[in-house]
Image (tube, rainbow, N blue to C red):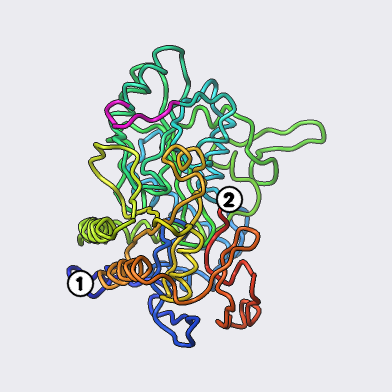
Amino acid sequence: MTAVLDNSCASFATVSGADLQVPLVNGSTCTYANFDYAASAPALAHVTERIADLLPYYSSVHRGAGYASRVSTAAYEKARVTVSNFVGAQSDAVVIFTRNTTDSLNLLAGCVPGDTVVLDIEHHANLLPWNDRRVVVAAESIAETLVSIEAELAAKPAALLAVTGASNVTGEVLPIDELAALAHRYGARILVDGAQLVPHRRVDIEALGVDYLAFSGHKLYAPHGAGVLVGKRDWLDAAEPYLAGGGAVRHVGLDHAEWAPVPARHEAGTPNVLGVVALAAACEALEHFEVAGSVDHERRLSDRLRDGLTAVPGVDVLTVWNDSPDSVGIVTFSVDGFGPGEIAAYLSAEHGIGVRDGKFCAHPLLARLGHADGAVRASLGLGSSDADVDRLIGAIETLVADGPSWTYEEENGWWNPIPDPRPFPELAGGAAGVGSPCATQTVSIAS
């Protein structure tokens, strides 16, 4: 496990796809510049190595007597301890493995014995699952937003305050310790959606006073389909199992079932052993990289990107608050005269740059910020470099000064270069036809 400390031409860590060559519409190729970490991060080398080590032993867990099954079971349960230690879980907390953050939040939503207070800035995964939700509209400052949250909690009892740790639209980080103290003052617990925060900042939930934390492996450099819910046992033990099936029970009769306690209670079926072990390996790597200076590296690149884009005429960089003390590596922007899908298609087809365009599963927030039709999100990670940042800024400067050199058209929400001569590899079915959603490496404006 190695880290590049302060080389302006290099990334901080080795990730999959770092040397990927992609075709451009002019017939040339270039190295792919990945600015879509906030959606799904590439795999760290440490993660792929761990998976390669485990694959020969891969087997079903918990009830197998074979040697491979015992090894897989031990690796699965060791991962639970690794994740618990990584997030500083309390001694009475439990780690439940899920598919992703959305799965974790939906699981917890079925366990909450009362109302949930949320902000209007939330990702849909932390807005839609709560059955009895009360929405607080974020103010222009974090300080004013805290006042609004307190007023809502004081007006009527709530069981849970559910907040994002860092906005998936702007990257702005919330004061989790203050929010936790506020929730507890009024008898509520706090859930933190850590999907964007955990990959970028170390989160110690015991020190912060957090009751529940959810996050995803695919944003944590472990794209193998595992997620985490960690927190207090009592609500989770009292609730009906999230899924009914094998592994979640102690005994089954034809007319009754005796459910197991957590974590087994909410982990029915054959678990994603490889995904869970990959996620734990990513936690180990991130702990190492933090010590080596990864946070400072990301902050420097983020500042470079924000400053560079802000200096381009007609570019608007989105923010929620005017007093945010910290932001993770997410910069969302618009360009006067160009739609977000057209910008994303242009960056991909002419510059080999991958960004995300749309509403980022945060429709209410984008509408309130004046971007109901969406924006462009550039997100950074351990594989990002100064050269990547400068390349993106330069591409936007060229777009503003000269416009695109190719023609782009929108069809069914997808923007495509017309024509699109770029071939696809065989694993993706060969050549992509014009109008294919795959042809632009962008997402639908509705996402």
Answer with the quarter of the image where residue 252 lies.
top right
Q: Position of residue 345 (x, y in %)?
A: 50, 68
Q: Residue at x 44, y 49 (%)?
A: 80
Is residue 203 rendered to the left or right of residue 7? right
Above/below status of 340 relative to 23: above
Is the N terminus in the top left, top right, bottom left or bottom right quadrant? bottom left
Q: Which mark is residue 8?
A: 1
Q: Is residue 15 left or right of residue 389?
A: right
Q: Give the amino acid type for the residue marked by disc 2 in the picture.
A: Ala
Instruction: Tell me the amino acid under the disc marked 1.
Output: Ser
Q: Nearer the viewer, residue 23 or 12?
A: 23
Mark 1 Cα-neighbour bin, 10 Å: few <14, some 14–19, many ≥20: few
Quick one: label 1 or label 2, which is nearer the N terminus? Answer: 1
- Residue range highlighted in magenta: 136-144
Q: Is residue 225 magenta?
A: no
| Residue to which mark 2 is pinned | 446
Q: Residue at x 55, y 22 (%)?
A: 113
